[in-house]
Image (spheres, rainbow, N blue to C red):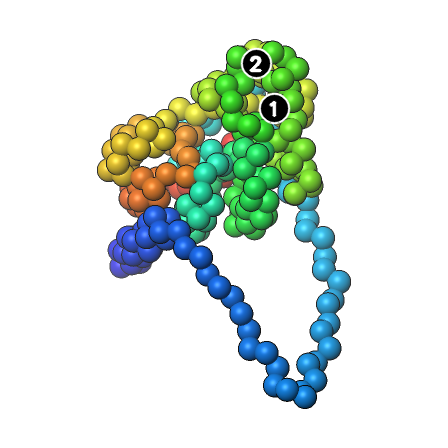
């Protein structure tokens, strides 16, 4: 059956992805030199089109300033990932999602984008949402106003420089919800909503992949927004089982924008 084949592919892809995430290696790339006295053909460099600007934030009328989940009427969920950590793990998670036909939302840390700028376009090219998770991933709710605003705009500036947009969402760092002050600052920076969540995977505690899977699958339901993280091997190992469970229950993993549209 098609459903059985898809689940088999998820399991097979998981083994390869986990291995890739756990073993970091170096690759040497080279090409054969042209034979002596043989003229190399002249290289042509056609003009490259500038990438299209990424989607911008939008307001969803009728929804609160801080969104933890969507209305429950549609069989969709949003898997949201805090964007930080080993880029190899990030690529593995993106590949697993894409092989399953799932879309995710990545809330990127600005300093992480400084180190790995290519990942901004990689996320968008995969059809995923990309948003703002502050610049240094510190406890933003405890910062003075000017410092908190600098954390929001610092990441927004990186996103704009890399993608042409400040990203579709803002999520406060080291907090499930924003204080009223931080929510106002996010709105001033251009984000109509703060993105929270109603399911916390607790993957950042490294409890083991089965525990991450159980935590999500026991709590997720139509309209849920799930909090996960790049950078953890448990998350890579758990994601195929999570996606398989969602598929079995008729729930589709979509971007947060699609979830709320």
Residue 257 pos. (x, y %):
54, 35
Q: Residue at x 46, y 22 (%)?
A: 174
Q: Within 10 angstroms of label 2, few (less than 14), some, or many (20 or more) residues? A: few
Q: Would residue 74 be found to the left or right of residue 153 on screen?
A: left
Residue at image mark 1: 151
Mark 2 lies on a secondary structure that is loop
Nearer the N terminus, badge 2 or badge 1?
2
Within 10 Å of disc 1 (Cα), the crowding (few <14, some 14-19, many 20+) is many
What residue is shown at x 61% (from left), y 82% (from top)? 34
Which quadrant does the C terminus fall into?
Answer: top right
Q: Quadrant of the N terminus?
A: bottom left
**What residue is pinned by disc 2?**
143
What percent of the width, then of the height, locates residue 210? 24, 37
Q: Label 2 to label 1, Cα distance in Å?
A: 9 Å
Most foreground residue, 41 or 259: 41
Q: Is residue 259 visible?
A: no
Q: Against 148, is 18 above or below?
A: below
Where is residue 149, by image quadrant?
Answer: top right
Contact between labelled residues 1 and 2, with CB atoms less than 8 Å apart: yes
């Amino acid at each position: 059956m098609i459903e059985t084949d898809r689940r088999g592919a998820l399991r097979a892809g998981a083994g390869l992805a986990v291995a890739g995430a756990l073993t970091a290696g170096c690759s040497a790339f080279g090409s054969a030199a042209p034979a002596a006295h043989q003229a190399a053909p002249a290289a042509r460099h056609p003009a490259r089109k500038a990438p299209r600007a990424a989607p911008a934030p939008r307001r969803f009328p009728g929804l609160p300033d801080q969104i933890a989940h969507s209305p429950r009427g549609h069989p969709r969920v949003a898997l949201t990932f805090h964007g930080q950590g080993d880029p190899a793990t990030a690529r593995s998670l993106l590949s697993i999602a894409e092989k399953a036909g799932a879309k995710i939302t990545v809330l990127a840390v600005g300093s992480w984008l400084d180190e790995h700028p290519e990942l901004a376009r990689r996320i968008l090219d995969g059809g995923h949402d990309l948003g703002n998770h502050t610049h240094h991933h510190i406890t933003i709710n405890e910062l003075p106003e000017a410092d908190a605003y600098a954390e929001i705009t610092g990441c927004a500036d990186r996103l704009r420089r890399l993608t042409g947009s400040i990203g579709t969402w803002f999520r406060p760092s080291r907090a499930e919800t924003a204080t009223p002050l931080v929510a106002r600052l996010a709105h001033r920076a251009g984000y109509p909503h703060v993105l929270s969540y109603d399911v916390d995977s607790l993957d950042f505690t490294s409890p083991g992949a089965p525990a991450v899977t159980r935590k999500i699958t026991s709590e997720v339901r139509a309209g849920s927004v799930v909090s996960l993280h790049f950078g953890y091997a448990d998350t890579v190992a758990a994601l195929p089982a999570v996606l398989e469970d969602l598929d079995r229950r008729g729930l589709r993993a979509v971007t947060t924008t699609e979830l709320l549209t």
